[in-house]
Amino acid sequence: MKSNRSIFKIFNRHSVPLKSKDLGGKLKAPLQGHRVCYAYFFALTLAFVLTLSSCSKYFDQVPQDRLSMSEVFKTRSGALGYLGNVYTYIPDEFNQRQVHETVLYRTPGPWTAASDETEYVSPGNKAKLINYNTLDATDETMVKWRWKSWYTGIQQANEFMASIDKTPADQVSTSEKVQWKAEAKALRAIYYFYLVRAYGPVPILTEEYTQNTPTEELQLPRNPVDECISYIVTQLKEAQKEGLLQSATSDAVTGYGRIDQAVAQAFVIEALTLRASWLFDGESNYYANLVNLDGTKLFPETPNAATIKSNWQKVADESADFLNRFGSRFKLMYTDNSGKSVPSPDDAGFDPYESYRRAVRTPRSEIGNNTEMIFYRIDNSAGTMEYDRMPNDHRISDGNYKGGSLLGATQEQVDAYFMSNGLSPINGYKADGVTPNINEASGYVEDGFSKSDYKSSTGQLYAPAGTRMMYVNREPRFYADITFNGQKWFDGTNGGNITDFYYSGSCGKLYGVNDYSSTGYLVRKCMGAGNRNQPLVCVLLRLPNIYFNYMEALAHISPSSPELWKYMNMIRKRAGIPMYGEGANALPRPTSFDDVMELIRKEKE
């Protein structure tokens, strides 16, 4: 089994991680040591965006011409179709492998594989460029097109807001125009958030640009971080007040998937958390000398303790506001072992494994049942994700029931999951970076094989007899997220096989050739029983994202805050492991900032 103990951390916060490691950490960053200005690159890109901004298939006309903007907005279907086009640049983060931009794949990216959580076997995967620190601004698939796509979305949002009022009243009502314009405004802010998250400070388009704008006027400098974040937050708050629905599910026109007040508030929190983080608050030496050509500093000065606390207070306030306003709408999911909803984790039929699995994996047909989803993409590349995470078992001939064994979880990620008693099995590694320091108190046993099936109290088979002991007695989320050697694949047609990742095993390199796990594990998260062509919802933000941002903010303000432990314990209780300071087998609550932050990081890993 390969052990890949990479210490690389990506700049971005990816939304479909196993367990992300971005909380206040010292993350390795791109642009390290560079004094750069993307003005010329931006000018070329924006010119391209302006040329293509109205050229989607929606507007293609047969046989000769395409609709003009005035014609598009003459009808309800034209206006609504244009707004729908603005939505198409929401990331499709199910696609971690095919990162080129096409009509089918909007802003995908290998954020999971570019971290120390997973690894693709393919040497051509773009994650390798990030891991090897060889990614630069000339890469078209990972840099140019991502930049282009979000600025295209921004330009189209601007065009929509400028044109929707021209649509006749008998086609679109005044209230709908107000709502749709607010959606476009929020989408524009969200795309700026994604740009800042990926590139750091970026140019904010404060004027209208057309295809006739001279090139020299498009050579725009980047706005400083504080201006970018302030713009994003201000625009989202204005959209909330100017017409966003309280809940988009009440919109009889399209229902699910629309931007509403809750989505806008979630991105306010995400943006402020990014700004308060170590990378963006002025503490990072990587960006201390990053300036525009005119000398304008793009990152703030190193903050004092009061400033740091003030930045995190903003996160805490906005998080509390979200929970107060939308707490009755968004709730953690609790189900029994068949997936049927139960009232609480105290219910006799509660199953932590199935509750968690259904929270992170949602079929389109069950979109209304997931009470944790805040922001998501319905149209996505679920088939690619499923192929990457499904075992390539040579015993199965039906291609619908076998995958590529491509996305391998690293040993570090496997080690990050807790034991059933809620303790970490590994406390770091020895000087070689590979040999683990075993936490004896956790009950972790690295060697040997189990003599009997390891099951949950509700009958879930976690690890069959004969499994390596290092995979026995782990927390329920481990079994929902990781496919390990000797684990039973999901039940169903062609299901029930025991995975074997050894070289000559049923899922090994001998039979897989190029499709096999390079780490000895597979990511299992989001997978389900049955074939690999099930339409799923790509969840980009869930309720626990709000909880973790809130907890991190409270840790910086008051590490002993009861609110912090309230939400930490809600997550752990749903996960089926002991809580801190309450409940059966309670674990002690630390009081220092460093110790509390370490627990938050471990929980979010």
Image (cartoon, rainbow, N blue to C red):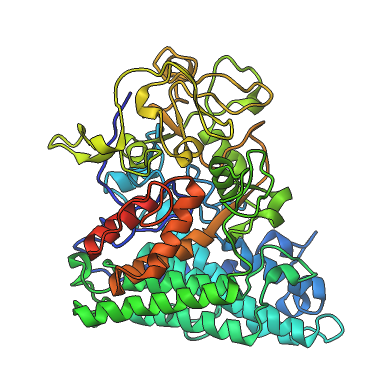
Residue 554 placement (x, y as % from top left)? 35, 71
The answer to whether any part of residue 38 appears in the image is no
> Which residue lies at the image location 52% right of the left edge and 33% below the top edge?
456
Q: Residue furthest right?
A: 170
Q: Is residue 171 above or below residue 337?
A: below
From the viewer's side, name the closer residue of 3 and 33: 3
Give the image quarter of residue 171. bottom right
Q: Is residue 241 above or below residue 410?
A: below
Residue 378 as seen in the image, left or right of residue 463: right
Residue 353 as seen in the image, left or right of residue 603: right
Q: Which quadrant of the figure contains the N terminus?
A: top left
Residue 347 as seen in the image, left or right of residue 176: left
The answer to whether any part of residue 321 appears in the image is yes
Q: Is residue 232 above or below residue 32?
A: below
From the viewer's side, name the closer residue of 472 and 548: 472
Residue 528 placement (x, y as % from top left)? 61, 36
Q: Residue furthest top?
A: 504
Q: Residue furthest left?
A: 431
Give the image quarter of residue 444. top left
> Which residue lies at the image location 44% right of the left edge and 18% below the top edge?
508
